[in-house]
Image (cartoon, rainbow, N blue to C red):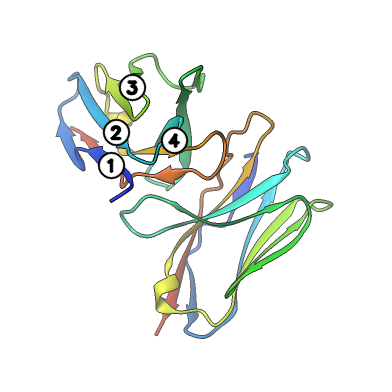
Amino acid sequence: QKEVEQDPGPLSVPEGAIVSLNCTYSNSAFQYFMWYRQYSRKGPELLMYTYSSGNKEDGRFTAQVDKSSKYISLFIRDSQPSDSATYLCAPRDSNYQLIWGAGTKLIIKP
Amino acid sequence: DTAVSQTPKYLVTQMGNDKSIKCEQNLGHDTMYWYKQDSKKFLKIMFSYNNKELIINETVPNRFSPKSPDKAHLNLHINSLELGDSAVYFCASSHGYNEQFFGPGTRLTVL
């Protein structure tokens, strides 16, 4: 079992829809949880991060962590074609290394 | 532009060759990384390095070696290339263990 599991998709939704992207993880010691966005043929870029359990909102994006179930979510409201990318969750371990999920490819149809 | 840059962007070579990929960051960061992203888009850390410590992922073959001439550069040397080395290699940098900034990637194809 991988430390971080993420459905690779692709997930295809119409423009304006609410998108839910999810990860599960196995290591209960993880405290910081990152979401990176990767456009095709580009390097990943940090979208947002959360510490421990709870929600964090940034514009149309909300990150949510449920440590009791080891479940991480990223919600995108009013999705736009420019949101089409691969979204990678990456908890940080006790050695400060990021443990990457495989990424979910998201396609927003105009 | 402040950024992480890598050269070359594309690299096509024969099995058995030795090649290098260069990485430079002008962000003033003290920690740099090399990642391998395979065909399934899975990112795997290969090395992390700052001026104090090199951390090597134990699964990385010793044919791969990072070389840092200074804090702004971390190059990746690969000896005796194999078919399985074909992937996209990303360099990244950070200030301490904060947000990592990634380069555009080097697409390596071994024939």
Q: Rounded to the nearest whole Å, what is the CA distance between mark 1 and mark 4?
A: 13 Å
Q: Residue at the spot x=68%, y=51% of the render? A: A24
Q: Rounded to the nearest whole Å, what is the CA distance between mark 2 and mark 3?
A: 11 Å
Q: Rounded to the nearest whole Å, what is the CA distance between mark 3 and mark 4?
A: 11 Å
**SS class of the residue under badge 1?**
strand
Q: Earlier in the sequence, mark 1 or mark 4?
A: 1
**SS class of the residue under badge 3?**
strand
For label 4, the residue is B29
For label 2, the residue is B23
Locate residue A40: give its quadrant.
Answer: bottom left
Q: Is residue B14 above or below residue A37?
A: above
Q: Rounded to the nearest whole Å, what is the CA distance between mark 1 and mark 3?
A: 15 Å
Which amino acid is tagged 3?
A: Asp
Q: Earlier in the sequence, mark 2 or mark 3?
A: 2
Q: Are marks 1 and 2 on the same chain?
A: yes
Q: Position of residue B13 (x, y in %)?
A: 15, 30
**SS class of the residue under badge 2?**
strand
Which amino acid is tagged 2?
A: Cys
Q: Residue at the spot x=62%, y=49% of the render? A: A5
Q: Position of residue A12 (x, y in %)?
A: 48, 74
Locate residue B61: give its quadrant.
Answer: top left
